[in-house]
Image: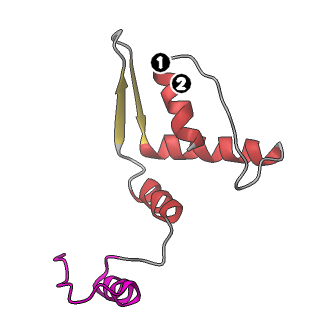
Amino acid sequence: MTAPEITTYDPDALRELWYREGFYSELTWPDVLAESCVSGASATIVYADAEGGQLVTTVGEIHTLAQRVAAALQDRGVRAGDAVAVQLPNGIEARLRTRRCC
């Protein structure tokens, strides 16, 4: 995909041009992320820590766990826009838990 030539700095005209050229989409960032998690579900991710620990998982497994965490938070009354704080120890598992909440 080649960037279109910009001949104006009118935001509305640029937005229309970028939609037409495929640089913009009606999809939101969460839509794109969810779509990527499904289409790339089998991609392997290897987490390694400084102490030599290693955890091998897939994008699909992380996405499934993220959905479970989101459902559990919703079951407890957390809604879109609410702030959620967590305290986790350092380590691979903590990083995975953090990714699940994002």
Residue 58 lies within the magenta run: no
User: x and y percent of residue 91 in the render?
Assistant: 47, 18
Foreground residue among 21 and 92: 21
Answer above or below: position of 48 versus 11.
above
In x, y percent, where is residue 79? Answer: 76, 53
Q: Examine the rendered structure and indicate whether residue 60 appears above or below residue 56.
A: below
Residue 43: percent from left, percent from top: 35, 45
Q: Give the range drawn in magenta.
A: 1-23
Residue at 29 percent across and 84 percent down: it is: 9
The secondary structure type at the circle numbered 1 is loop
Q: Which amino acid type is marked by label 2?
A: Ala
| In this rendering, position of residue 54 left or right of residue 35 | left
Coloration of the structure image: secondary structure
Q: In this view, does 4 lie to the left or right of 56?
A: left
- Report the residue marked by disc 2: 94
Circle 2 SS class: helix
Mark 1 burial class by Cα count in 10 Å: few <14, some 14-19, many 20+ = some
In depth, the one of 63 and 23 nearer the eye is: 23
Q: Which residue is drawn at 31% across and 88% down?
A: 17
**Quadrant housing the C terminus:** top right
Identify the residue at the far front of this view.
Answer: 9
Residue 63 at x, y percent in the picture: 52, 46
Write down the quadrant of residue 21 in the picture: bottom left
The residue that disc 1 covers is 91
The furthest residue to the top: 51
Amino acid type indicated by mark 1: Gly
Q: How far apart are marks 1 and 2 (CA)?
A: 5 Å
Crowd rating for badge 2 (residues with CA inside 10 Å; few <14, some 14–19, many 20+): few
Are circles 1 and 2 on residues that touch, CB within 8 Å? Answer: yes
Taking the spot 70% from the left edge, 54% from the top edge, the residue there is: 81
Magenta residue check for 13: yes
